[in-house]
Image: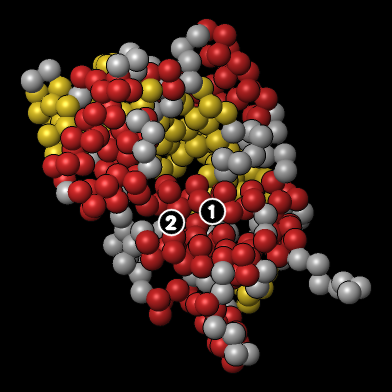
Amino acid sequence: MISQSQFDSFKTEAISKQPLRRRIQLSDLKFHTMDCVEYCGVMLGVNRKGLQDIVKIIGMSSAGSKSLEQAVGENSAVDILNSLKNIIGGISKEVTIAVTPDRVITRVTPTDKSSLISIQTYFDTFETMANRHDLSVKSVSFNSETGAVSIDALSNKSEVQVNQLKDEVFQTGLSFSKTVEGIQADPYMHRLVCTNGMVTRQFEESYKLKSMEPKMWEEFYKHLDRIEQNDFKPKAFNDTVLRSMNAPASLAELERGVNLLTGHSNIESKELEIFFKGISQTYNKYHASGIDTVKLSQEQKRNCRTGVTHWDLINGITDFASHNYGYEKKPNADRYLQVQAGDILAKGPDTNNLVLNQPF
């Protein structure tokens, strides 16, 4: 658990490094290069996500902007982006930019889709909620580029068991995050047998707060009170876990798990068996059967069963994300992996859709 002094230090750092947010007219930004713009005589950097936001607002895909730069060169691409931006901006397109203390634009969102909930309000809300529902902080994370903050907190009085299975006992709580869109509260499940954490965003208990209107705050707190009555556990959690335990992961799902680990850390392929027991046997058996898995389409892989259960796949991801096994990880990787694991659980196994005994 995170101590009060550790939490206070985290809070101070997140507030001090939170990007400044400002409403501006899109046309007031002038590209000098693909990663540098001018605003009111001040030169600002633009990171990859900020550039993606801008090109999306002006109606161009990220891939399209890269192709444009490759085709005509950076200078011409900058001219075209400025022209498109000014056309859009000419109809009074107001956007909200997030600028880090070292003057880099990290996010650009249409103002009507951007929340005005401050970082201080976020922390005040969490502390009110933690006191109200007797929550203790399990983990925290902060992305200094985007300003995204997340706090995972466990209830001191909620513990649930799935279908009387001794290894499937969870301490429940809330994952409380702040993004450019506002505040989001999601069920947080902490598996006690291996201390794995998972954020579940795809269940009905998740809630987004995007407005400062009193009516929306009232509904937000009422929602939290309702889910506390169910011990912060998603209503469909038991059935979803049992379904996941009783189905093999598809080859597509297994590869998604592999890509999550290898794409966010320096883990090597030969070490994946530690987290996905049965992965080596799966590929050996397919190749021994004359099936080249590399040549299969994504749809075909969804129809291929593996030697790893859907539940073991999820636990492999959360195990990796919840502990320090000595691998170098990307910033904020653990939080991302826990959310992805929750999404995989809520989606359900691909192999549940297979019809094995057909009359024709």
* Residue linked to disc 1: 341
The residue under the point 55% across, 13% down is 216
Check contact, mark 1 vs mark 2: CB within 8 A: yes
Residue 113 placed where, x, y %? 44, 22
* Residue linked to disc 2: 321
Q: Is residue 250 left or right of residue 331?
A: right
Considering every residue shown, the one lying at the far top of the view is: 214
| Label 2: element kind | helix
The residue under the point 30% across, 23% down is 87
Q: Is residue 210 above or below residue 250?
A: above
Q: CA distance from mark 1 to mark 2?
A: 10 Å
Q: Is residue 160 left or right of residue 319?
A: right
Residue 153 placed where, x, y %? 48, 37
Residue 143 placed where, x, y %? 30, 39
Q: Quadrant of residue 107?
A: top left
Front residue (pair 109, 309): 109
Front residue (pair 337, 324): 337
Q: Residues within 10 Å of mark 2 (few under 14, many from 20)?
A: many
| Quadrant, the C terminus | bottom right
Q: Is residue 326 above or below residue 170?
A: below
Amino acid at circle 1: Ala
Q: Residues within 10 Å of mark 1 (few under 14, many from 20)?
A: many
The residue under the point 21% across, 41% down is 77
Query: Colour scheme of this structure image?
Result: secondary structure
Amino acid at circle 2: Ala
Q: Quadrant of residue 248?
A: bottom right
Residue 128 placed where, x, y %? 47, 19
The residue under the point 43% across, 48% down is 336
| Quadrant, the N terminus | top left
The first of marks 1 and 2 along the sequence is 2
Considering every residue shown, the one lying at the far right of the view is: 359
